[in-house]
Amino acid sequence: MNFTFMEHTNIMQAHAMQAHITACKASGITVVAYCLQHQIKPSHYYYWQNKLQPQRAGKFIAIAPPSVTAPVSIIFTNGNRICFENMPPADYVKSLVI
């Protein structure tokens, strides 16, 4: 695989920071204390920690809209009215109006 110098540098830095993150977690000391001992800026540590963690799935889930069971009336400006016991699909209503 051919990497540019910057890609190679980023890969090496990612490996080094992954080693620091693993060592910090195993050390039992705080991130700030670990960073002080290893002359790493805490912001740099947290940047790489966030960048290297696996992407999580979105927090939203799809839900079906509730079905309307109440009677529905559509009154037009010319006085005509369409009444339904339950709300029909929007495409059906649109086909009646056009």
Image (tube, rainbow, N blue to C red):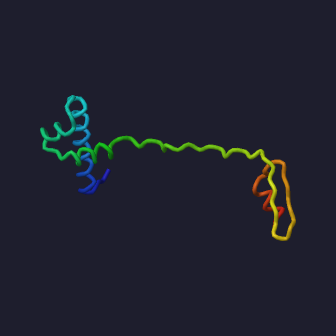
Instruction: Name the image quarter holding residue 6.
Output: bottom left
Which residue in the rendered view is the most extreme toward the right? 80
Identify which residue, 67 or 46, lies in the foreground: 67
Report the side of 81 relative to 12 (left or right): right
How many marks the image carries: the answer is: 0
* Position in image of residue 59 (x %, y %): 49, 43
Report the side of 27 relative to 64 (left or right): left
Identify which residue, 32 or 8, lies in the foreground: 32
- Relative to 47, does residue 19 appear above or below in the rendering? above
- Relative to 55, does residue 28 appear above or below in the rendering? above
Instruction: Name the image quarter holding residue 79.
Output: bottom right
Report the side of 37 relative to 72 (left or right): left
Q: Residue at x 62, y 43 (%)?
A: 63
- Relative to 9, does residue 27 appear above or below in the rendering? above
The C terminus - image quarter: bottom right
* Position in image of residue 97 (x %, y %): 82, 65
Identify which residue, 80 or 38, lies in the foreground: 80
Report the side of 64 relative to 14 (left or right): right
* Position in image of residue 10 (x %, y %): 26, 51
* Position in image of residue 83 (x %, y %): 85, 55
Identify which residue, 79 or 37, lies in the foreground: 79
Q: Residue at x 23, y 42 (%)?
A: 17
Which residue in the rendered view is the most extreme toward the bottom? 78
